[in-house]
Image (tube, grey):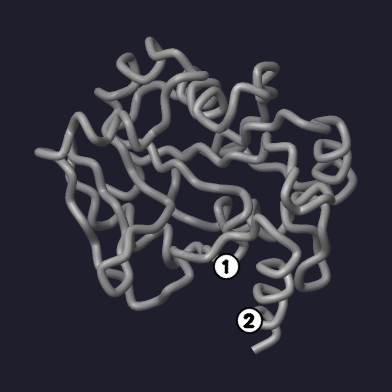
Amino acid sequence: MANKIKGILLFAGESKRMGKLKPLLPIGGKTVVETVLSEYLASSLSEIVLVLGHRADDIKEIIDDRKISSSKLKVIINKDFKKEMFSSIQAGLAEVEGTEGILIGLGDQVLITSDIINELTEHYIKGKVLIPTFQGRKGHPIIIPYAMKDEILAMDAEKTTLKDVLGRHNDIIKFLEMKSNKILIDMDTKKEYERIKDIWKK
């Protein structure tokens, strides 16, 4: 099943709470976008749509300078990124064709590894939504069925969240308990960023 899953990686936000552009912050000797993207490219996902928005040219410059390229990678720009995350999910979904499931990943989840992604894709069941959990708490990335694409694209990005959509499909949601809490950790603030850097060193 793993090779039948494609991914959307969201890096379009404005990093308002951080105060600095999150994708270009240093982590482990690289930038955040390099670190996260390298794990996605190393995973079993057959395609990754990287969705940029705020300061897209600056992020693309890093990707080009570091020669991050792959036949699996497609970089797009969401011109409506100010309409919150849902518009970036829509922009990414619009580029995905011919798959059974779509993994939606958050760019600021720096601790997500290819092994975590692969575990999710290996457990995905066609037609279902798969949500990772740790000690009962829901995390990301999640996998949605391709059949949900048109429903999401038809919604108003300024009035809808992915949680709203999933709430209409409780009957097809499956949970996968993970061994690591990394699926719960993202970085919206400087404090969270410092915590992630400490974890990274261990």
| Number of numbered discs | 2
At a point 61% along the width and 49% down the height, the residue shown is: 107
**Residue occupying the far left of the picture:** 171
Under mark 1, the amino acid is Leu
Amino acid at pointer 2: Ile
Q: Residue 97 carries which label?
A: none
108 in relation to 196, above or below = above
Quadrant where the C terminus lies?
bottom right
Q: Where is residue 68 in the image (x, y as percent from the top left)?
A: 75, 47
Residue 183 point in image, percent of width and height: 44, 64
Q: In which quarter of the image is residue 77?
A: top right
- Image location (x, y in percent) of residue 156: 44, 13
- Label 1 to label 2: alpha-carbon separation: 9 Å
The vertical placement of 45 against 187, above or below, is above
Which element carries disc 2, helix, strand or loop?
A: helix
Q: Quadrant of residue 160?
A: top left
Horizontal arrangement in the rendering, residue 82 relative to residue 62 (left or right): left
Is 116 displayed left or right of 173 in the figure? right
Which of the numbered marks, if any, corresponds to residue 199? 2
In this view, the residue in front, 114 or 195, is 195
**Residue under numbered circle 1:** 111
**Residue drawn 66% across and 68% down?**
192
Q: From what the image shows, is residue 198 above or below residue 106?
A: below
Identify whether 155 is placed above or below 166.
above
Q: Are marks 1 and 2 in contact (CB under 8 Å)?
A: yes
Q: Label 1: few (<14), some or many (≥20) within 10 Å?
A: many
* Residue at point 54%, 23% (across, down): 87
Q: Residue at x 67, y 76 (%)?
A: 195
Q: How crowded is mark 2: few (under 14 residues within 10 Å), some or many (20 or more)?
A: few
Which SS class for mark 1? loop
Q: In the image, residue 196 lies at what x, y percent?
A: 66, 73
Lower sequence index among marks 1 and 2: 1
